[in-house]
Image (cartoon, helix red, strand yellow):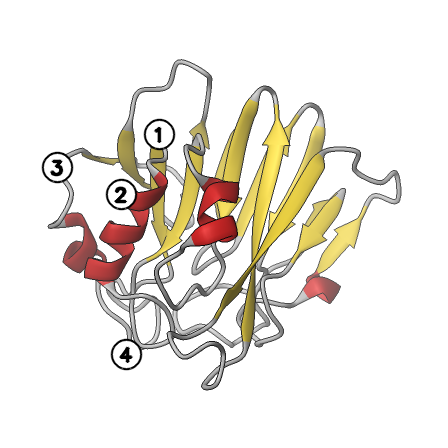
Amino acid sequence: MLIQWLGHSCFRVEADGYSLVFDPYEDGSVPGLAPLRLRADAVFCSHGHHDHCARELVTLSGRGCPLKVETAASYHDDRLGLLRGKNTIHILSAEGMRLVHLGDLGHRLTGKALAAVKGADALLLPVGGHFTIDAATAKAVADDIGARVVFPMHYRLGAMGYDVIGTLDSYTALCGDVKYYEGDTFQLDRDTPSQTAVLTYGK
């Protein structure tokens, strides 16, 4: 499974010969990020905000995507959606592995939602706070889920990201297994060791 980070919460995933895009952002919606122009077999958005739902920027192949993608209901805040509404978690099953994209999750998971994502092979985890869970809550969520490889997303780094959200190191300082990669792409296999994988935007 090939996992490419395209900035903010946008990822392109290739598995079993198909490609999927999660949470594409609109042009100019996220400081420091280049416009997206993508091709894929399917696109999924966690919610309708501009920095997560630019479906029109993803040209679909038209052949469809038979891979299993399930959802789990959650909220964009810790007040049952009162502040920012609902958030959809996407769970991709392919190549004998499960990848979970948490979107703009705003709270700890419990019950059915936690059970649906428990023990995932890859977890795409927002860590910046303000609009999502903050670094400390993100670490608790990651521990609750127990994913093998965790990819931080939705954070501020240099000129990239919103001024009001937290920095990457606020999260990585809480982790003892961080590995930094020079590129934006990660090859996930069944024998990939447990880690917090930090990808480099645009490389």
Image location of residue 137, percent across then percent down? 25, 60
Between marks 4 and 1, how big is the CA–CA gap? 30 Å
Disc on the earlier residue, 3 or 4: 4
Disc on the earlier residue, 4 or 1: 1
Dot 4 falls on a residue whose secondary structure is loop
Between marks 2 and 1, how big is the CA–CA gap? 10 Å
Note whether residue 200 is visible: no
The residue wearing badge 1 is: 148
What residue appears at the point 74 percent right and 65 percent down from the top-left corner?
56
The residue wearing badge 2 is: 143
What residue appears at the point 36 percent right and 43 percent down from the top-left corner?
151
Q: Is residue 47 above or below residue 65?
A: below
Residue density around tag 1, few if under 14, some if 14–19, many if 20 or more, within 10 Å = some
What kind of residue is marked 2?
A: Asp
Residue density around tag 4, few if under 14, some if 14–19, many if 20 or more, within 10 Å = few
Disc on the earlier residue, 3 or 2: 2
Q: Residue 163: which disc?
A: 4
